[in-house]
Image (cartoon, coloured by chain):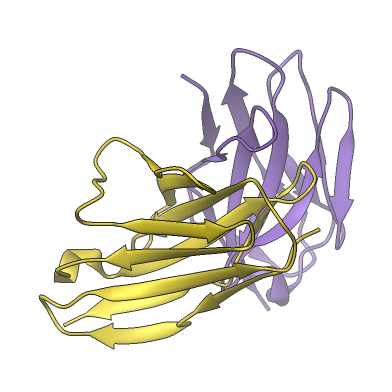
Chain colours: A yellow, B purple
Amino acid sequence: SAVISQKPSRDICQRGTSLTIQCQVDSQVTMMFWYRQQPGQSLTLIATANQGSEATYESGFVIDKFPISRPNLTFSTLTVSNMSPEDSSIYLCSVDGGGTIYFGEGSWLTVV
Amino acid sequence: GDSVTQMEGPVTLSEEAFLTINCTYTATGYPSLFWYVQYPGEGLQLLLKATKADDKGSNKGFEATYRKETTSFHLEKGSVQVSDSAVYFCALTMNRDDKIIFGKGTRLHILP
């Protein structure tokens, strides 16, 4: 299994600012995934982060808007840049813990 | 590409009713299948999983059987409780360290 901690859990952000979300895992993992869940919607994959290499972004997501760091095998950050109200979402970190995908509690962002 | 289709919600039932939430998948190989639950105001929790055909996942009174012949993984519970009110997501992943693909989610309301 894997235990994932995310920070912040919630935040209210001003339009035009940037916020960095941290994800810490209690064990070493190869891949970490960042998802977005817009209000009332399902989860959409933003990018896959592999330690030591650049993140791989899904269609519709770009590095300038969602820069990701993966400095080691237990930690990753996602930055939401130049935020607008459309970025109000839950952002979730996930990992594969032995064949099962585990999620953090999510970071609930509201942009005003 | 690989995909998951689950029944539209919301589903409203009375307490102690029988629950079925349908889920079918499309995949080129043999995926692992999952049900996740999201309670109001909370993150995503793994409810149950199955990794090969005919496997039955079970947890908290919920069950789902991996049916390769019908490419289905329907979620069932014999007697629902008010506390089961949540959004349920069916999902698949093809390989370890691969991204997880979600259905759109089914919102469940249980009336006392």
What is the x, y in percent for residue A39? 34, 65
Is A3 on the left or on the right of A78, as rendered?
right
Is B79 on the left or on the right of A12, as rendered?
right
Q: Name the residue nearer the viewer: A106 or A17.
A: A17
Q: Name the residue nearer the viewer: A16 or B49.
A: A16
Is A2 on the left or on the right of B40, as rendered?
right
Q: Residue at x 61, y 43 (%)?
A: B90
What is the x, y in percent for residue A36? 39, 57
Q: Name the residue nearer the viewer: A105 or B70.
A: A105
Q: Residue at x 14, y 69 (%)?
A: A84
Q: Name the residue nearer the viewer: B89 or A16.
A: A16
What is the x, y in percent for residue B25? 60, 26
Q: Residue at x 83, y 61 (%)?
A: B79
Q: Residue at x 21, y 66 (%)?
A: A81
Q: Is residue A96 visible?
A: yes
* Quarter where residue B4 is shown: top right
Q: Is A107 situated above or below B47?
A: below
Q: Is A90 situated above or below A44?
A: below
What is the x, y in percent for residue A101? 68, 49
Count of all numbered marks drawn on residues in the image: 0
